[in-house]
Image (spheres, helix red, strand yellow):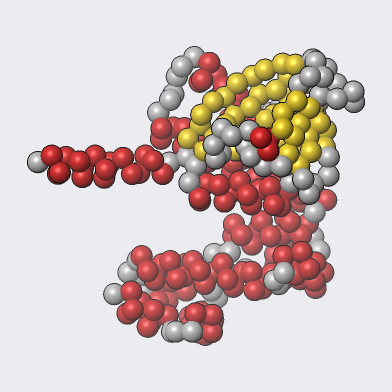
Amino acid sequence: MQNVMSGLRMKFQTPFQSLPDIGLVQTESYTDESYFWDNSIRDQGPGVVIQQTLSGSVFFQKEGESPAYIEPGYCMMFAYGEPSHYTLNEHCERPYKLRWIYMTGNSGFLSIVNEIREQFGSKLRMRSKGEASQLLHQLHEDFEHGMNRDRFYLADSAHRLLVALYREQIAGARGYDPIAYGRHLLETQYRSPRNLKEWAQEIGISREHFTREFKQRYQESPAQFLRRLRLEHAQVLLHNHTLRLPDVATASGFASEQTFYRAYKSYFGVPAGTQRKLKL
């Protein structure tokens, strides 16, 4: 009986352990130039900090990135242990008022963090009236009053905050960085049977220009990127669902069954039908 109960405890603990978590949300204010943090020597454990500027500004520098002043309308994202630092120097406006959140999560959660930083850097847009800012404000209120500490609520809030932050960067990129905006469209709408010409028209540039600039930046063409996303999605469906092959093709964004069959065999080396039989 003891072994059974121990097994049950492990069974019910595992999902909770894999959920993202929010460790702390606080609002602070500083005026002294002695305010300085070197993240490379901070060892609070794995996780990510999002630090929003409410007033004033702070100087942030990450190795390999341009130095930046984080003023109102922006936040900085960093991890403990990384080669970065931030401080109030003579060029920073006072008082520096900030709101920060510390979040931890599994590899899937942290991959979203890494994707955001790789695409947009450590200085991120965060408008005071935007969705991300409002979510952070609500979480601060919750922590201040000792409310809503449920793990599912916090896990959902952590994901929503990252998604809202990503959306805000993309919205800003549409005008000044159509290539990044185009990648976002492909990544979030790849199950649509649209072609590259239609996406390029929405982005506002020619298909040729989009293809050239996309490949130079991401080391694969938008067509290759789109095909990979669709095929990887199709493989997940084949492994985990009992959909008919034509339905898998449609659900993965392929315009026809034959196009799907040819692309799948070329990419994975086996026909889609054989892949399903191997799974069974």
Give how far across and how far down residue 142 sits, in percent: 50, 20
Give how far across and how far down residue 99 sits, in percent: 66, 24
Q: Residue at x 69, y 52 (%)?
A: 118
Where's the C terminus, which quadrant? bottom left
For residue 253, say whether it is visible.
no
Horizontal placement of 278 versus 50: left or right?
Answer: left
| Extreme-left residue of the structure | 1
| Occupied quadrant, residue 275 | bottom left
Q: Is residue 122 above or below residue 108?
A: above
| Extreme-front residue of the structure | 41
Where's the N terminus, which quadrant? top left
Horizontal placement of 177 versus 129: left or right?
Answer: right
Q: Residue at x 82, y 19 (%)?
A: 33
Q: Is residue 207 above or below residue 5?
A: below
| Occupied quadrant, residue 91 | top right
Along the viewing direction, whichever of 180 and 171 lies nearer the viewer: 180
Q: Residue at x 64, y 69 (%)?
A: 225
For residue 249, say whether it is visible.
yes
- How many discs mark residues in the rendered view? 0
Along the viewing direction, whichever of 89 and 163 lies nearer the viewer: 89
Give how far across and how far down residue 272 sits, in percent: 42, 80
Along the viewing direction, whichever of 26 and 65 lies nearer the viewer: 65
Give how far across and how far down residue 205 sits, in percent: 81, 64
